[in-house]
Amino acid sequence: MPRFWTRLCHAPRPLRLLLLGEMLGLLAGALGQVGVAWWIARIGGAADLSRYGALLALGSLLALPLLSPLGDRWPKLRLIRMGRLCLLLEALALALLAARDASFYSLPLLCACGLLAVLAQAVLLPAQAALLPELVETEQLPQAIRLRRGAQALGSLLGPGLGGVALALGDLLLAMSLNLAMFALAALAAFRLEAPPPPARRATGGWLGDLRAGLRAKWGVPLDRWWSLSGALMMVFFLPATGLLLPLRLQSLGLSAGWFGACGTALSIGLLAGVLGLADRLIARLDRVRAIGVALLLCGLAVGAAGLCNWAPGLVLLFGLIGLCMSVTQLVGQTHRLLATPADFRARMAAGQLALAHLAAALAPALAGALLTRWPVATVYPLLAGGFLLSSLLLLAVPGLRPFLRLGHEEVRDWYLHQHPRAFAPAQPSGNSVIDSTCLSNCSASRRLQLSLSWVRRHNKRDIPWRR
């Protein structure tokens, strides 16, 4: 932990403020989720809690892709500040509702606050992901991503614990007040953040045109497409094992709720230990391709063993191992994918990745429920592990993955654009064999050059048969 804080304090000021705001935002979000879930469960019961969760999941699935063009149209720093302000307003509304009366409860108002937070996150998360490469040099980007993963793990680790302590020591108002204070600090960090001016860019085809261009780019790069789809399939099998099924597994062993907290803490500590150095050592020793293969294998085996192990400390150790493996899978390839994506498509492609993650999170409980109707929870864990391992084989079999991961950081910059220029080209009418000058004028200079060279090479080969 001291090593993480030392690295964070020595990071460039813009990066430090970005990560500090992200960590405080995650801490506040986790704290608020604990408080709101307890609020709804105490008064409204399981039925209201399921309605609340389903509405927010649907809102996330719709908001992330529909708002994705914002990140490539507007300055990312402005979007981050807007998102932080909206989250601060949502936290203020929750605190005011909690202050009215100890028995006050209104599911529509809580859902409205939750949807405001969903919209804010849909604006904020892609902008944060796309801004990171603009704050540091290329050679510093891997270290910046490690610091980001550490900040995320720390925020996710401290948030639920702080929420539980607040509810135990005081009441709901104390938890909501802490939530408001954390979001206020995150907003302050966002407004103190300074970023380089964004490159000049004009919208190429209206809002829907930009939305279609982002979807076309995400689908038009086979490597990124299959990487995202196989990763989402892995999440469908992985998320129930670390979330929904864990309390059921512990209850089947007659263990107390304290062991549930211990397993969650071990998961976050394993993730944090990985991003602070253990994952780097494994990657340096094995190389990126072998490291991700070993991490996926160990993660799948640990998930399966969680259904077979009846010893409580053993379960805690298994979840610590799962967290460590998660750190390796999250670090391998993240720098490459960020650098390979053209700068003016990063927010939209990041939003597409987040939308797939939310879709997987929505499908995971349905899969777990279907399996539980036929088998006990101890049997479901090995079944989920088998599905996870099979889907991880799909990831390792993605065409072009191995040579892509073996490229250097300078070689991989704008690699998607170089390999698949049509995926990022403006939409053109069918049969038009020339480059539309209006479309080209709306592109950045580097993209105009790439598209022009691509067009020249293509037509030279087609129109001059003897050219080699």
Image (cartoon, rainbow, N blue to C red):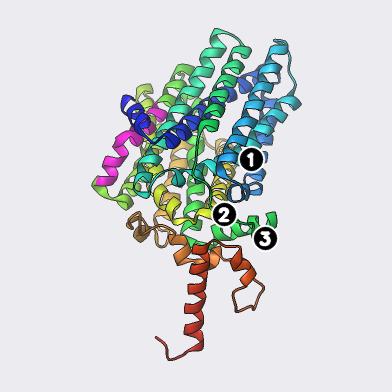
Q: Position of residue 8 (x, y in %)?
A: 37, 31
Q: CA distance from mark 2 to mark 1?
A: 30 Å
Mark 1, residue position = 60
Comes first in the chain, label 2 or label 3: 2
Magenta stretch encompasses residue 147? no
Q: Is residue 313 above or below residue 215?
A: above
Magenta stretch encompasses residue 283? yes
Report crowding for label 1: few under 14, some 14 to 19, many 20 or more residues within 10 A (C-alpha). many
Nearest to the observer: residue 390 or residue 7: 7
Which circle, 3 or 1, is nearer the viewer? 3
Q: Is residue 68 above or below residue 105?
A: below
Comes first in the chain, label 2 or label 1: 1
- Residue at 52% x, 70% y: name it: 451
Say left or right for 189 vs 213. Answer: left
Quarter of the image where the C terminus is located: bottom left
Q: Quadrant of residue 45?
A: top right
**Amino acid at circle 2:** Ala
Q: Position of residue 462 (x, y in %)?
A: 50, 85
Mark 3, residue position = 205
Quarter of the image where the N terminus is located: top left
Which circle, 2 or 1, is nearer the viewer? 2
**Amino acid at circle 1:** Ser
- Residue at 61% x, 47% y: name it: 74
Q: CA distance from mark 3 to mark 1?
A: 25 Å
The kind of secondary structure element at disc 3 is loop
Nearest to the observer: residue 265 or residue 1: 1
Magenta segment? 266-284
- In the rendered structure, find residue 200 and report the number of the disc placed on it: 2
